[in-house]
Image (cartoon, rainbow, N blue to C red):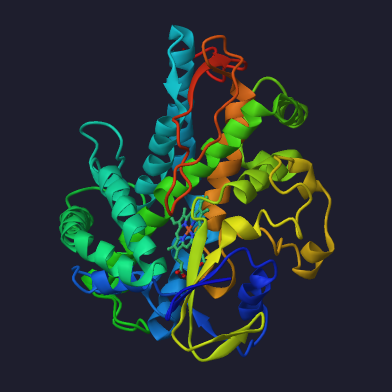
């Protein structure tokens, strides 16, 4: 453990720290932790939404209400099922464009294509508009999310490094405010489109659902327009880059491990056959696919660090933690801790095919796999993200071989960028070679 400042602690690794997060969910732990991103929270005061966003809202009535709305409505299994057709269309577009590149022998920036896929799928879910091509209604949102990540990254560093961080944060306050104003203009346009009865939105999307809450006099908490916008921002920020980045790292590891790649392809072939594209409903019968995706999530958590603050004085792992101390929890280190994982830095999906005692204890949830966080502040988008992750990885392996470097035999450089988010340092540029063309008769 490293003590950075009076109010900020960093828990490096902490092999048993994950138990604390889980205990909050499964028992009435006397230790009460809340998540606050103090710098983001304080700069959020200057934004149009103050602190209504879930990321910066402290534990309390509003948090519980919004969390319930997300888990039981907006991101519920029923809603995920209802949006299956949107994901299907976007995956087909993605595969079409890859098949075209393969036929023209054009190199592909895999990360950029994945970002288009996941951001379009999510943007359509939230506002029924695509965002990646010129002329798309939600064009511009991806740039806003990217900028927010860049600014947020510096703000979070600000939290960890105490006074020096305060200086860093100050430098970016103006940029942060401008960013939120740009976001506001976009969200206002989307809300107006949804309220305009003449603009026909085909299916009920998450913005329609939020607007219903806004108009509901009997809702437990009054949802103002600012509350709605804050939640829309959370959905965009939470979902855009995280999902695509995880697929990218997983595919890169598969390219570097041809045995695992071929084993997965073989599993898909034995379950799906050779005449149709893998579907979301196939995933339950593909245990190796599930293990591969979990291994990608373990090694490359896109948000490697999360934060909590102590709601009262407490003791953690023998250390006295004063009330209001900010703690950063290093999910990355926990998931590579040699005390919990055999050969922790190795890509070895088979580890997830062996059930461990810890898994049994957690009733099917792997205690050590913390990519989506844990406890009452765990990621509410995990189920949606996993649905996209499984299907996309499966389709990329079923349909293409991925050639890297001039001779097509090079290994992917797995170096990561320095910063608060786990990005690949070098773009993954590949030549896709068609193995199975799902559009063979329609192209
Ligand atoms: C691979 C994809 C994703 C990863 C790895 C991921 C990871 C995380 C992590 C680590 C947290 C913090 C958890 C904690 O502190 O315990 C979080 C929170 C959150 N995520 Fe995700 N996420 C992903 C996808 C999504 C998606 C698709 C959405 C929504 C569409 C989403 C929305 C959120 C929100 C709103 C929170 C804040 C929850 C709270 O404070 O209570 N995430 N996510």
- Residue 230 is situated, as x and y percent measured from the top left of the image, at 29, 66
Left or right of 238 in this view: 41: left
Query: In the displayed structure, would residue 435 be above or below residue 202?
Result: above
- Residue 328 is situated, as x and y percent measured from the top left of the image, at 50, 68
Q: Write down the quadrant of residue 177 in the picture.
A: bottom left
Camera-side residue: 262 or 34? 34
Report if residue 371 is visible in the image: no
- Residue 60 is situated, as x and y percent measured from the top left of the image, at 42, 85
Left or right of 66 in this view: 277: right
Camera-side residue: 133 or 105? 105
Q: How many marks?
A: 0
Left or right of 414 in this view: 89: left
**What residue is shown at x 58% (from left), y 55% (from top)?**
332
Query: In the displayed structure, would residue 317 be above or below residue 132?
Result: below
Camera-side residue: 272 or 97? 97
Left or right of 245 in this view: 229: left
Query: In the displayed structure, would residue 275 be above or below residue 307?
Result: above
Report if residue 317 is visible in the image: yes
**What residue is shown at x 64% (from left), y 60% (from top)?**
334
Query: In the displayed structure, would residue 210 be above or below residue 382?
Result: below
- Residue 363 is situated, as x and y percent measured from the top left of the image, at 76, 67
Camera-side residue: 272 or 107? 107
Q: Quadrant of the N terminus?
A: bottom right
């Amino acid at each position: 453990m490293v003590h950075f400042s009076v109010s900020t602690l960093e828990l490096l690794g902490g092999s048993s720290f994950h138990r604390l997060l889980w205990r909050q969910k499964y028992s009435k732990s006397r230790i009460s932790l809340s998540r606050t991103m103090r710098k983001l929270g304080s700069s959020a005061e200057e934004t149009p939404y103050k602190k209504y966003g879930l990321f910066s809202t402290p534990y309390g009535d509003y948090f519980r209400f919004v969390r319930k709305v997300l888990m039981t409505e907006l991101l519920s299994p029923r809603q995920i099922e209802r949006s299956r057709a949107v994901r299907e269309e976007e995956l087909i577009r993605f595969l079409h464009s890859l098949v075209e590149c393969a036929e023209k022998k054009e190199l592909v920036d895999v990360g950029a294509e994945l970002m288009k896929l996941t951001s379009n799928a999510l943007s359509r879910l939230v506002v029924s508009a695509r965002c990646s091509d010129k002329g798309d209604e939600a064009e511009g949102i991806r740039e806003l999310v990217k900028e927010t990540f860049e600014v947020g990254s510096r703000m979070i560093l600000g939290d960890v490094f105490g006074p020096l961080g305060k200086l860093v944060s100050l430098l970016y306050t103006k940029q942060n405010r401008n960013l939120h104003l740009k976001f506001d203009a976009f969200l206002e346009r989307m809300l107006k489109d949804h309220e305009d009865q003449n603009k026909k939105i085909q299916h009920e999307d998450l913005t329609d659902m939020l607007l219903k809450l806004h108009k509901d006099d009997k809702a437990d908490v009054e949802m103002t327009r600012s509350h709605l916008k804050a939640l829309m921002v959370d959905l965009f920020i939470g979902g855009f880059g995280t999902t695509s980045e995880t697929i990218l790292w997983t595919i890169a590891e598969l390219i570097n491990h041809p045995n695992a790649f071929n084993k997965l392809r073989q599993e898909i072939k034995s379950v799906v056959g050779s005449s149709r594209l893998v579907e979301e409903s196939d995933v339950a019968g593909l245990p190796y696919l599930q293990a591969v995706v979990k291994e990608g999530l373990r090694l490359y958590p896109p948000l490697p660090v999360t934060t909590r603050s102590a709601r009262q004085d407490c003791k953690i792992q023998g250390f006295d933690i004063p009330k209001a101390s900010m703690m950063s929890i290093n999910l990355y280190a926990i998931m590579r801790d040699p005390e919990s994982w055999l050969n922790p830095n190795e890509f070895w999906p088979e580890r997830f095919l062996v059930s461990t005692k810890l898994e049994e204890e957690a009733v099917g949830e792997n205690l050590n796999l913390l990519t989506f966080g844990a406890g009452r502040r765990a990621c509410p988008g995990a189920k949606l993200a996993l649905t996209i992750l499984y299907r996309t990885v499966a389709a990329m392996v079923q349909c293409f071989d991925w050639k890297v470097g001039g001779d097509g035999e090079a290994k992917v450089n797995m170096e990561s960028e320095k910063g608060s988010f786990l990005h690949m340092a070098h773009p993954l540029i590949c030549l896709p070679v068609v193995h199975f063309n799902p559009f063979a008769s329609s192209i």
